[in-house]
């Protein structure tokens, strides 16, 4: 009997409603709703407007305290640029400890995002109407394709992968289905406890630097550290990269994917782009991301900007 969680049993191959979903997607494409500033929906972002924005960080990359405003996003998020190294980041932002405490709570929003991801493959409720019934089969195929490309770049025997900000464990499950040992961490306590119960995943609640310093993740133990749609959310990306460097075996790879402000999509949408909203703390260009990674000690193996999606993918190696 099929469950409501496709990751448990593979999910359906196809259902009649998928024709409706396909039609909706085609309509969106015909109307050019993706990448159209007039079509940006910020309703889900504004649900979290309960927080005060009163923390003014220094530059994470170089420590410079002075910055200049670059733009304001359509949800009011103020984005600044470091006057020394040029890194873009959100300032002011939600107090770090308040944000951590909120993510650790068993609250309605954390449950909503987690259950949506587990059932439909989307966190935001507005996107559920675009979810195919076979979303997990598609997602697993894509994740495994990415993993195989990383294995080829690695060039050795890949045995262990760690997924930073693992969410609902998509990458972990895809890797396990390939016979790879996979583990991860996340700050959303509800998500971590849920996927532990459902799938028995080896996942930790907490920030990566703290887990590393306390010995919950081992030094020089992993072949690949994976950061997909994570580094823009963390308050301290350089500390996360330092921890990842220590976790990797010599020759190991780090994979990073995030949105990119030197992409054509940013140039087209500007301040209307929903990637620039308040729950993203950092707004990397390909160059500022490469600088942060190399400053930690990694050697860049690959860095590609996808102009259509507005994203950058980077792979770097621990010498």
Image (cartoon, helix red, strand yellow):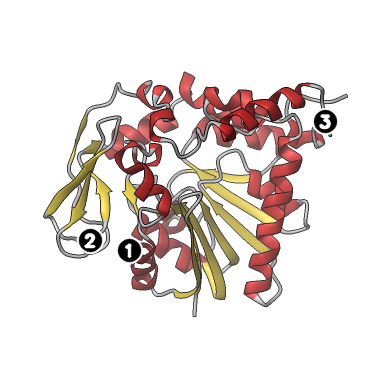
Left or right: residue 292 versus residue 218 is: left
Q: Mark 1: which secondary structure?
A: helix
Q: How many C-alpha atoms fall within 10 Å of the one at disc 2: few (<14), some, or many (≥20)?
A: some
Rendered image quadrant of residue 25: top right
**Quarter placement of the N terminus:** top right
Q: Mark 3: which secondary structure?
A: loop
- What residue is shown at x 81% (from left), y 22% (from top)? 16
Q: CA distance from mark 3 to mark 2?
A: 48 Å
The residue positioned farthest toward the left in the image shown: 66
User: In the picture shown, does residue 184 fall above or below 32?
Assistant: below
User: In the picture shown, does residue 53 fall above or below 70?
Assistant: above
Residue 154 visible in this rendered orientation of the protein: yes
Q: Are marks 3 and 2 in contact (CB under 8 Å)?
A: no
According to the picture, the residue beneath numbered tag 3 turns out to be: 14
Left or right: residue 287 versus residue 118 is: left
- What residue is shown at x 36% (from left), y 42% (from top)? 269
State the residue in front, 164 or 311: 311
- What residue is shown at x 76% (from left), y 21% (from top)? 17
State the residue in front, 36 or 291: 36
Q: Mark number for residue 86?
A: 2
According to the picture, the residue beneath numbered tag 1 turns out to be: 288
Q: Point out the tag, 1 or 2, that comes first from the N-terminus.
A: 2
Left or right: residue 270 versus residue 83 is: right
The image shows residue 183 at horizontal and vertical percentages of 62, 52
The image shows residue 229 at horizontal and vertical percentages of 49, 48
Q: Nearer the viewer, mark 3 or mark 1?
A: 3
- What residue is shown at x 34% (from left), y 69% (from top)? 291
């Amino acid at each position: 009997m099929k469950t409501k969680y496709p990751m448990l049993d593979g999910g359906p191959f196809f259902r009649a409603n998928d024709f409706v979903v396909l039609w909706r997607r085609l309509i969106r494409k015909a109307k050019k709703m993706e990448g159209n500033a007039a079509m940006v929906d910020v309703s889900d972002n504004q649900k979290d407007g309960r927080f005060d924005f009163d923390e003014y960080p220094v530059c994470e990359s170089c420590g410079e305290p002075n910055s200049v405003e670059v733009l304001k996003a359509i949800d009011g998020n103020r984005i600044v640029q470091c006057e020394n190294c040029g890194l873009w980041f959100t300032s002011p932002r939600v107090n770090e400890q308040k944000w951590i405490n909120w993510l650790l709570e068993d609250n309605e929003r954390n449950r909503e995002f987690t259950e949506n991801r587990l059932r439909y493959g989307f966190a935001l409720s507005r996107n559920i109407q675009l979810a195919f019934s076979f979303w997990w089969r598609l997602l697993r195929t894509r994740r495994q394709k990415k993993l195989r490309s990383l294995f080829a770049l690695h060039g050795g025997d890949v045995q262990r992968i760690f997924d930073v900000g693992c969410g609902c464990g998509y990458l972990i499950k895809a890797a396990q289905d390939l016979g790879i040992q996979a583990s991860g961490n996340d700050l959303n306590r509800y998500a971590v406890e849920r996927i532990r119960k459902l799938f028995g995943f080896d996942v930790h609640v907490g920030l990566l630097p703290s887990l590393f310093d306390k010995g919950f993740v081992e030094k020089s133990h992993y072949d690949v550290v994976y950061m997909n749609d994570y580094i823009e959310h963390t308050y301290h990306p350089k500390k996360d990269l330092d921890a990842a460097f220590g976790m990797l075996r010599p020759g190991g790879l780090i994979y990073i994917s995030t949105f990119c402000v030197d992409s054509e999509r940013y140039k087209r949408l500007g301040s209307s782009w929903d990637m620039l909203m308040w729950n993203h703390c950092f707004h990397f260009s390909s160059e500022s991301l490469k600088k942060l990674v190399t400053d930690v000690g990694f050697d860049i193996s690959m860095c590609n900007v996808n102009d259509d999606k507005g994203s950058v993918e980077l792979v770097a190696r621990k010498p």
